[in-house]
Image (cartoon, rainbow, N blue to C red):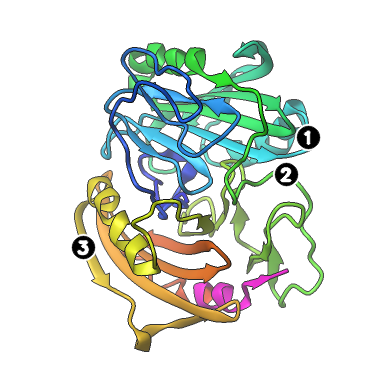
Amino acid sequence: MKTIRSAILLLLALCLAALPLVSCADTATTQSGVEVPAGMQDATGDGQGYAFFVPSGWTVDFSTGITVASVSALSGVNVTLAIFPSDASPEEYWAQSRDEIAAKFTDFRMEEEAGTTLLDGAAALRYHYGGTYYTGTAYRQLQYLSRHAGNLFVLTCTAPESQYDQYRAQFDAITDSFRFLDGTVVPGADGNAPGASDQSGAPDGMKDISDPAIHAYRLFVPDSWRTDMQTGICSAYVSDSDRSSISLTCYYPSNSNIHSIRDYWDALQKSYASLYTDYRVLSTATADTAIPVAGTDGAPYTFSGTNGGVSYRVLQVFFLRGSYIYTFTYTATDALFDTHMPEVEQILASLSFR
């Protein structure tokens, strides 16, 4: 992810740099034939088994395994939808995620815990919480957890505390218009459910943050790093005071205009330019800069930009595996980017497929 949405997408905290193509136009119906409500746009993407809508004009990202919809590139108001296979109940998922969520705030507070509600007529739990994020900005979040067709649906609404009441009606419109459909849900390829990773064979001083029941790969990070799976993306960050992060996502190029890694990189540029002010490409991949990743050649790209008044540098390494384009993303502030490069190189070198 996620993704490097740290300053504007709060719980995606610097793990979503693999941004997708953006679609902001209203359509009459979804691919499944569900009518788009007035004033809303289709944010379902290629998902099956549900229909998801957000206000017209919002920026929509739906190709990294979760859906991210934000008011604008410079706004901290956003809604995320993560869908992943899991045997866990919503109560169990929350119990396993609560500490991860609380750790992102300096003064975490619950306003509502395990409120019983409905999501399109299906039983759901609602959690309302907030606190001050490490950047010093206070946020409030509203999260819905529900099970359908063997998958967990995690819908999270986020806004700075000063803007939460202003956008609450739009958050309610998003949840009220959500629909479960007949048929099998096809979640994002990098969805993640709580589960125990297999630590056998982990390099010294590293741990596997992947879930063997879901991920085709093994992703190792230093033991001291903190995992961040609450969003559905396989990711980790250095510490609560240092949000330098890595993530691994994959994308199935259903777009007929994407035939190569370079095509995919070119398609991402509009999203990146809208996400960052002062966006600048620092380096692009060539045959001479290939990085070995999991038995193949990875194509490295770096860029920089400012978001929320903070200057970031990002390394992305793209590589092919079967029909998928995998994206490894490392994100850090300018001041810390070089500091963690030895660890990032170790992470890349240890990445493997099962």
The type of residue carrying mark 1 is Ala
Classed neighbour count for the residue bearing mark 2: other residues with Cα under 10 Å, few (<14), some (14–19), many (≥20): many
Task: Please identify the quarter of the rendering in which residue 334 is found.
Answer: bottom left
Does residue 171 sit above or below 17 in this rendering?
above
Query: In the rendered structure, does residue 51 fall within the stretch colored magenta?
Result: no
Instruction: Check residue 17 in the rendering and tell me which mark sits there, or answer none.
Output: none
**Residue shown at 68% from the left, 57% from the top:** 215
Which residue is labeled 1 in the image?
A: 88
Residues in magenta?
Answer: 344-354
Where is residue 107? Give x, y as percent: 53, 32
Which residue is labeled 3 in the image?
A: 280
Which residue is labeled 2 in the image?
A: 194
The type of residue carrying mark 3 is Arg
Where is residue 263? Give x, y as percent: 33, 64
Alpha carbon distance from label 2 to label 1: 8 Å
Q: Earlier in the sequence, mark 2 or mark 3?
A: 2
Depth check: give the residue in front, 334 or 68.
Answer: 68
Main secondary-structure element of the magenta-colored stretch = helix
The reply to whether discs 2 and 1 touch (Cβ–Cβ < 8 Å) is yes
Classed neighbour count for the residue bearing mark 3: other residues with Cα under 10 Å, few (<14), some (14–19), many (≥20): some
